[in-house]
Image: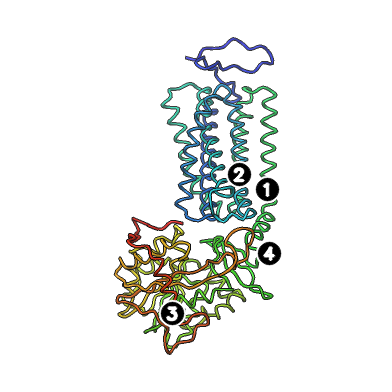
């Protein structure tokens, strides 16, 4: 039973007792049943907002730093740990639960709402491209995960205290009610983030709107339902704090477009011509006019650099085309540059291109500079483009249909691409190859990540291929990080490739084919010798259930 208190002196704050003492019922402006319902609604909304903050940090960290598994693990593990600390810290606020909850919600709305913008700003202006765990996005990611987790963890103990003050009930029942509202709110927040906030508002505006909702709901509960539990001074402080948080979030929302443009210029340079968000990724195109080299970025990663793309694509395509090549399959390559090199060879009857992102294909066809660079290859009548996941497409492809398969896919160190460098994937590629057919795979930079490269080679051998590894030189000057943000400075120092076939493939150029501008038989042989000197022996193959690649 709740023991009543003696009336407090006029002007003194309400007393709920000390640790172990009695807890006074709240003085509500509504009936207890309505009050409980409003608290559970607040639990629901706060849980939805909290999960949006978590997903926002994971999504933005993956975009900025790659390797979704690592970033998700860092964010979620730090948050869960911090939530435990926050729950313990909230014990000290139980005797001032209403004021404590109001302060926690205002702080959470500010931290969670501004987290995406702060991360993007540090990434754009510090020059940290995912290197060591020093100052930069990675440390800020941990800091925001820790702060957000602490504040989320403090919510439930304070809400438990508030709901018990409305109507005392057994602890198990109260926990069940709060947990149900919390989990349903988490479901709604988890679904709202990918299907509503991200596609319609974007990462930055979505986080700011979530913070505003968090502020309004948390502040309304305390200042409306539990206002009699607060001193006049506490009421004014919470009101001013919530108004200040809303003002900050609203100002950031008004300036978000200008901020994005400035940050994009800081990341990609001043000559950004195209910046669009497709259903798959962010696509940015720079240069290509007034003598400036064209550069194509996908989710912040340099995919095409006009200053050295020919060196990359000639080394990728031409060794594989030395042999029968009437029917060619290009996996990835939505920019049309690998297809350009394929079509240079006489005797090509059909080229099938499987690209996940239709937006990249449209850009490759419609952007004048990119279409000029790829020679309008995707408009050639021999080319058929399918918008599909390469893994799923191969499963439905007819067997022995292609003489050459060109795997021009994102880097194997990106978690989302790991399945496209698995033993199962190469088994499907082997099935669609005609007798005597050849598969060539871009396996990432060799000099900086030899273990990843040789894991690709080991995986191809495990899938039943014989292999011929080789490399081609990329940029020779500049730095891949730091203040130099030119496309050339962010190109790899070299590229590693693996030519594979059922029988031992021969590294050569087609005697009756076109003469590559950047590749000769001698440089191809030298690239094979250089690759052989970097071999990492006895690496296990990568599979769907045992991925071996890491960013």
Q: Nearer the viewer, mark 1 or mark 4?
A: 4
Horizontal arrangement in the rendering, residue 455 relative to residue 334 (left or right): left
Front position among marks 3 and 4: 4
Mark 2 or mark 4, which has the lower sequence index? 2
Q: Is residue 446 left or right of residue 368?
A: left
Q: Nearer the viewer, residue 412 or 283?
A: 412
The earlier-in-sequence mark between 3 and 4 is 4
Disc 1 to disc 2: CB gap under 8 Å: yes
- What is the distance, in whole Å, between disc 2 and disc 3 at their CAs? 47 Å
Q: How is the model colour-coded? A: rainbow
Residue bearing mark 3: 351
Of the two numbered discs 1 and 3 on the same chain, state the one appearing first in sequence: 1
Q: Are marks 1 and 3 in contact (CB under 8 Å)?
A: no
Q: CA distance from mark 1 to mark 3?
A: 48 Å
Residue 270 image label: 4
Mark 1 residue crowding within 10 angstroms, few (<14) / some (14–19) / many (20+): some
Q: Which mark lies nearer to you, 2 or 4? A: 4
Up-down relation of residue 376 to residue 144 (above or below): below
Q: Which mark identifies residue 113?
A: 2
**Residue 328 horizontal side relative to residue 369, left or right:** left
Q: Name the N-terminal-most of marks 2 and 3.
A: 2
Residue drawn at the location 51% of the way across and 52% of the way down: 194
State the separation of the CA atoms marked 2 and 4.
28 Å
Query: Could you say where residue 374 lies in the image, as x and y percent from the top left?
Result: 55, 78
Regarding mark 1 in the picture, which secondary structure is present there? helix
Q: Circle 2 sits in a helix, a strand or a loop, which is it?
A: helix
Q: Are marks 1 and 4 in contact (CB under 8 Å)?
A: no
Q: Which residue is mark 1?
A: 252
Count residues near mark 3 (Cα–Cα under 10 Å), then give few for <14, some for 14-19, many for 20+: many
């Amino acid at each position: 039973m709740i023991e009543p208190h003696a009336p407090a002196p006029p002007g003194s704050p309400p007393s709920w007792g000390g640790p172990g003492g009695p807890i006074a019922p709240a003085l509500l402006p509504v009936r207890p049943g309505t009050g409980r319902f409003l608290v559970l609604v607040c639990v629901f909304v706060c849980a939805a907002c909290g999960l949006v903050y978590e997903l926002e940090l994971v999504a933005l960290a993956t975009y900025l730093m790659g390797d979704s598994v690592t970033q998700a693990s860092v964010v979620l593990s730090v948050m869960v740990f911090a939530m435990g600390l926050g729950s313990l810290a909230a014990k000290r606020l139980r005797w001032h639960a209403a004021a404590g909850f109001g302060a926690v919600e205002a702080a959470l709305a500010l931290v969670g709402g501004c987290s995406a913008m702060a991360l993007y700003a540090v990434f754009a202006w510090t020059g940290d491209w995912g290197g060591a765990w020093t100052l930069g996005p990675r440390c800020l990611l941990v800091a925001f995960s820790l702060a957000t987790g602490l504040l989320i963890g403090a919510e439930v103990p304070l809400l438990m205290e508030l709901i018990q003050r409305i109507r005392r009930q057994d602890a198990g029942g109260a926990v069940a009610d709060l947990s149900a509202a919390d989990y349903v709110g988490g479901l709604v927040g988890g679904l709202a983030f990918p299907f509503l906030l991200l596609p319609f508002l974007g990462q930055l505006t979505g986080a700011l709107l979530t913070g505003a909702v968090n502020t309004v709901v948390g502040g309304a509960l305390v200042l409306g339902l539990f206002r009699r539990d607060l001193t006049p001074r506490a009421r004014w402080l919470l009101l001013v704090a919530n108004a200040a948080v809303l003002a900050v979030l609203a100002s950031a929302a008004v300036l978000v477009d200008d901020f994005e443009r400035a940050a994009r210029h800081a990341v990609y340079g001043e000559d950004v011509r195209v910046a669009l968000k497709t259903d798959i990724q962010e696509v940015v195109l720079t240069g290509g006019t007034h003598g400036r080299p064209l550069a194509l970025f996908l989710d912040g990663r340099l995919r095409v650099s006009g200053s050295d793309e020919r060196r990359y694509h000639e080394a990728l395509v031409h060794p594989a085309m030395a042999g029968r090549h009437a029917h060619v399959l290009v996996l990835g390559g939505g920019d049309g540059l690998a297809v350009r090199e394929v079509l240079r060879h006489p005797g090509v009857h059909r080229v099938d291109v499987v690209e996940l992102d239709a937006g990249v294909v449209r850009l490759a066809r419609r952007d004048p500079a990119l279409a000029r660079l790829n020679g309008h290859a995707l408009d050639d009548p021999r080319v058929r483009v399918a918008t599909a996941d390469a893994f799923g497409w191969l499963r439905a492809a007819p067997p022995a249909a292609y003489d050459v398969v060109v795997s021009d896919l994102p880097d194997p160190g990106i978690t989302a691409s790991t399945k496209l460098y698995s033993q199962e994937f190469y088994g499907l590629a082997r099935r669609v190859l005609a007798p005597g057919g050849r598969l060539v795979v871009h396996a990432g930079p060799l000099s900086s990540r030899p273990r990843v490269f040789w894991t690709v080679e080991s995986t191809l051998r495990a899938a039943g291929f014989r292999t011929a590894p080789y490399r081609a030189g990329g940029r020779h000057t500049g730095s891949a990080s730091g203040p130099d943000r030119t496309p050339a400075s962010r190109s790899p120092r070299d590229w590693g490739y693996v030519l594979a076939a059922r029988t031992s493939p021969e590294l050569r150029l087609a005697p009756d084919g076109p003469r590559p501008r950047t590749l000769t038989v001698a440089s191809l042989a030298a690239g094979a010798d250089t690759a052989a000197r970097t071999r990492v022996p006895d690496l296990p193959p990568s599979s769907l259930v045992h991925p071996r690649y890491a960013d």
